[in-house]
Amino acid sequence: MSTGFAIALIGAALATALAGCGSAWGVGVAGQAAAGVVSEDPAQFAKVLILQLLPGTQGIYGLLVTFITLSKVGLLGGAPAVSMDTATGLAILAACLPIAIVGLVSGLHQGKTSAASIGIVAKRPDQFGKAMLFPAMVETYAILALLISILSVSNVPV
Amino acid sequence: MAIVQMQKLSIAASKKNRKAILELLQSMGVMEIHTDSLTDPDLRKMDTQTARMKYDRRADSFDRVLALLDTYAPEKKSMLDSFKGPEEVGRSRLDQVIKERRSLNQDAATILKYEKQISDLKGVIQKNENQIEWLIPWQELDVPMTSEGTKETALLLGSLPGELAAPDVYAAAAEGLPEPACVTADVISTGNEATLVSVLTLKKDREKVEENLRRHGFARPQQIVRGVPREVIEDLKKENEHEQKHIEALEKKIAEFAPKREDYKVAGDYYRSRSAKYSLLGTIPQSENAFFLEGYVPADQAGAVKTLLGEKFGAVVETEEIAEDEQVPTLLKNNRFSASVEGVLESYGLPTRGHVDPTFVMSIFYVFFFGMMLSDAGYGILMFLACGFLLKKYPNMGSGMKKMMQMFFWCGISTAFWGFMFGGVFGDLADVIAKTWFGYPADGPAIIPALWFVPLNNPMRLLLWCMLFGVIHLFAGLLIKGYEYLKDGDVVGFVSDVLSWLMFLMGLILILLPTDLFEGIAQMEFNFPPFVGTLAKILTFAGLALILVMAERSTKNWVLRILLGAYDVYGVTSWLSDVLSYSRLLALGLATGVIASVVNMMAGMVAQGKGIIGVILFIVICLAGHTLNFAINVLGAYVHTNRLQFVEFFGKFYEAGGEPFQPFTTANKYVEIKEERN
């Protein structure tokens, strides 16, 4: 097995691992706020649950990139490209980095924003539409990173 | 696609018709009443607080009764019942309830009395349980706690700190007494860093012994019960059982009222509506013989209100001029398709008078974008079937809920459409099944082919399409702004704020398309005839010049005006980021498809070659996986469709700030009164 193949796998692993960490972090922070609101006003459960889930998407984007990468290197069906050269492996690792890094950071920050938005719902449940918007703003950058990762991974020649 | 035109009516009528007129207005529910502007010092307002509070209390007592009935005689409810909405009740039923209101009020009082008894009894039980808990350490004592000893002996009961054994207690008690001391020390129980002791001694030694014990921290029991502790505990337990039975009997008695639940709901709503009427009555200015009202009525209802009040009660109803800066409540009116997204608009903020209601344009893009983001035919069909079923089965569900269901119904259809376009039906479920069990070749063509193309095979192509849709969406927003300018007759504004940008941006796009840069990114070649290039440059520079000169036309200083104009030109970067923002259409669409494939693949891998168990495992994994994928992606599609509308689209033209139209109407919580016309 070549070093290039191993490096490509490191990239694939980082995409899910780091973006997943970001989401876990974010959903955790938001979940604490959500639990606090529900303890006071159980009727807000559905709304705060939605807000809590918003930072969960980074993990899914990471999974997406990992999946595309794995099928690119032939690990999911087909013949694994075990003799991949080091440069190609590095290229795939680089392609995975945007979603890995941005997923981690934006997941955490989206979680904090969600927690703040949950505070809005606690005080003014009718402002749910606006509250939902703030975390969605943070997510934009995860989406941009996802896009670049997908485009790069699928266009790296193997 | 419109904000309903409002008319401002002022009503003056004789006081003797006051009640009837208010009731009529309440049942029509078409007028939002304002009385703040009627401030003639000769007019008085009635104090209705007492009456209002009385009706509030009544309504509240029925609320409590209904809550109690739900506890003690719960109705069978299915999970879908929350969609049911208020029940429809005929006017005759309401009249019946009004006639019987005395006996209903008595029922409520009785039920609440029973509840009071129940809570008192629960208090007693709690107290007894505390007592039992306190007595348990004493239960080894076989004489009454009140006993002081016999003729010759004295009994000391109490606790010593620390966990001691009988000889320690004896030693402590007998200190300084001649051996053998006439002291018997027993330990009743130890625990919690204390020892309960009974010490028996001669009456004459009692003082000495007690003093000895006190020096070691002896304390008499905090409370004394009459009788032997064990027996007292038994008695308390028996009493509790008895009280528990009493409580159950009372609960049963309350449950017996359950068949009249409906009546209580109607009565509760009746009192709530009366309270609303009295609270309005308290704000109405009145002279000796007349009273006055002002408020907004949808223009198409104003005539009906006028004639009804005029003919029936001889009231004077006049149409008032609405002042330019007056805040008029907003009511939206849209076709059935577009009305379904009104809730989304409301959550951002309603439009104000004189502005355009963007609901119609928004609804088209909303459904279109939602479908693109979810883009799976299987999920889409499920969604529109489920919403269609609920809408059909529960026609009375609350109006907000109903609109949302309708919205998801349309979004479901759009999702199914995009699913077929991109070849996703529960991901690639059909292919995985065919390959796992029916020997379909691993590299065979997709069983359900994409009508358009598969995004994952050519993401760049779809990205460009997304941006094109984005540009159309944004231009639609800009054009609405232009329409508002033209409607107000502000041609200069239209040219300098809307047309200039359209020219500038169109020119830039036309310049960008034939470049090598774009060709490199898109792998698409545009070969325009040369005049298009010239046109593009003319458009760009004309637009640029217009923005530079006109964007800050209110500024008098020309130097400043051009500088600020240049800053506005810089706003083109926000257009770039707005367009890029539409890449989420691609990203979320890919997410649905890829995760669905992952689920299918895992299920296929597990099921491979396991026979019937494999089939079961396959179904379980697919059900769980697709449910999760569906839930998370519906949430994503909803949030991000909203965002595209709120931030990108509304950012181009929309100003919220309208107050929702809140007509004076019946305050119904449980039932909907249906007029029966004969």
Image (cartoon, rainbow, N blue to C red):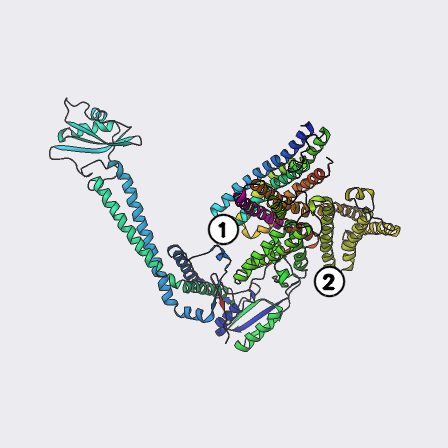
Which chain does the numbered disc 2 sit on? B
**Could you say where residue B482 lies in the image, as x and y percent from the top left?**
74, 58
As measured in the structure, the alpha-carbon distance from the residue carrying label 1 to the one carrying label 2 is 44 Å
The secondary structure type at the circle numbered 2 is helix
* Three-letter amino acid code of the residue under disc 1: Ala
The secondary structure type at the circle numbered 1 is helix
Q: What's the magenta region? A: B610-638
- Above or below: residue A115 compared with residue B287: above
The residue lying at 28 percent from left, 28 percent from top is B163
> What residue is pinned by disc 1?
A43
Front residue of this view, candidates B370 and B642: B370
Q: Is B134 a magenta residue?
A: no
- Above or below: residue B545 compared with residue B104: above
Along the horizontal axis of the image, is B198 left or right of B39? left
Mark 1, mark 2: which one is toward the viewer?
1
> What residue is pinned by disc 2?
B487
The answer, for residue B191, to whether it is visible in the render is: yes
**Could you say where residue B285 lies in the image, as x and y percent from the top left?**
52, 67
